[in-house]
Amino acid sequence: MFDELKNKFAESFVGEFISTAQNNDLTTRAASLALFSAMSVFPFIALLVWISTISGTPDEARLWANRFAMFLPPDFADLIRQEVDYRLQQEISGGLTAIVMHVVLIIVSAGGAIRSFLFSLRDIAKAEDAIGIHQIIFRSFLLIIPATFFVFFASALVGFVSFISNYISDALGSAWLSIPLIWLFMTGILITILNGAYASSLIGHQTIRIHGWIGSILAASLISIVTITMSAYYHVHPANREWYGTPGFIITVLLWFYACSICLLFGAQINAVKNLRRLRREDEDTRPSDN
C-alpha cells in the first residue's frame, strides 16, 4: 500500500515537479543567480545615479529610489537610499575612470547573472540552441543601455500606478486600499514581464515550453508575498534586523535575492512540468491501441 501511494505521488504533478526541480538543481542555480544579481546592483546604481544627475537633478535620482523603496525589504531600501545620497556627493567631473570601472563591473557581474538566469531556464526548457560565453558578454554589454532606461521608465510607471491607486482609494473613501492596490497592479505587471522572459528567444528553441500564465502568476505572486512578508517582519520586529550586527544587511539582501530567484525559477519549472504532462497526455491519446 505504501509503495502504491508512493508511486501515485511520484506520478502526480507535485511529485514530478519536486523530482524535476531536484534534477535541475534549482536551489543551487538560484543561489548563483542571487549572488551575481546582488553583485551587479551597486555598480548599476552608481552608473544610474551619474546618468540621472547629468540628465536631470539630484532630486530626480532620489525620487526613483524612494518610489522603488516600497517594493524592497527595509535594509535593501535603506542601503539604496544611502548609496544614492553618497553618489550624489561625489564629483561628476573627472570621473571617467570610475565610470569605465563601473561599466566593466556591470559587464562582469550582470553577465554572470544573465548567464546564470539564461542557462537555468535553458536547462529547464531543454533548449537546443547553444549560447557561447562571448555572446553572453556581448548581451550583457548591450543590456546596460535598455536596463538603465527601463529603470527610469519603471519609476514613471510606479508613479503612475501610485497615482491611480491613491485616486481609487480616495474615491472609495478607504485610504488603506492604496498600498494593496499598488502591490496588486505591480504584481500584474510583473506577471506579464515574467511570461515574456520565459518566452524570450534568448533562451533558444524550447524542447519543453517554459512560458505560460500559471507559472508566471505563481512566480510573481510568490515574489510579492516574499517581499511583503520580509518587510512586514522587520517592521514588526525591527530589533531582529540587528541580530547579525554590521553584516546583517548583506544577509538580508542576499536572502531576499535568493528567495526571489527561487520563485523565478520555480515559475519556469511549473510551466515546464505542466506542458510536459500535457504533451504526454496528447501522445497517449494519439497512440493507437493494441486492440
Image (tube, rainbow, N blue to C red):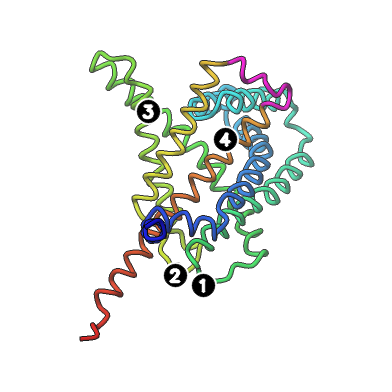
Q: Is residue 289 left or right of residue 160?
A: left
Report the Cα–Cα distance between label 2 and label 3: 37 Å
SS for callout 4: helix
Report the Cα–Cα distance between label 3 and label 4: 20 Å
Dot 1 crowding, Cα within 10 Å, few <14, some 14–19, many 20+: few
Give the residue pinned by disc 4: 256
Q: Amino acid at mark 1?
A: Glu
Of the image marks 3 and 1, the number of the one nearer the N terminus: 1
Dot 2 crowding, Cα within 10 Å, few <14, some 14–19, many 20+: some
Residue 125 shown in magenta: no
Report the Cα–Cα distance between label 2 and label 1: 7 Å
Of the image marks 3 and 4, the number of the one nearer the N terminus: 3
Q: Residue at x 73, y 23 (%)?
A: 246
Mark identifier at residue 128: 1
Quarter of the rendering containing residue 99: top right
Of the image marks 4 and 1, the number of the one nearer the N terminus: 1
Judge whether 214 appears above or below 11 on screen: above
Report the Cα–Cα distance between label 3 and label 1: 39 Å
Give the residue pinned by disc 2: 207
Q: Amino acid at mark 2?
A: Thr
Of the image marks 2 and 1, the number of the one nearer the N terminus: 1
Residue 272: percent from left, percent from top: 42, 60
Nearest to viewer (mark 3 / mark 1): 1
Q: Is residue 1 left or right of residue 260?
A: left
Quarter of the rendering containing residue 137: bottom right
Give the residue pinned by disc 3: 182
241 and 164: which is toward the camera: 241
SS for callout 1: loop
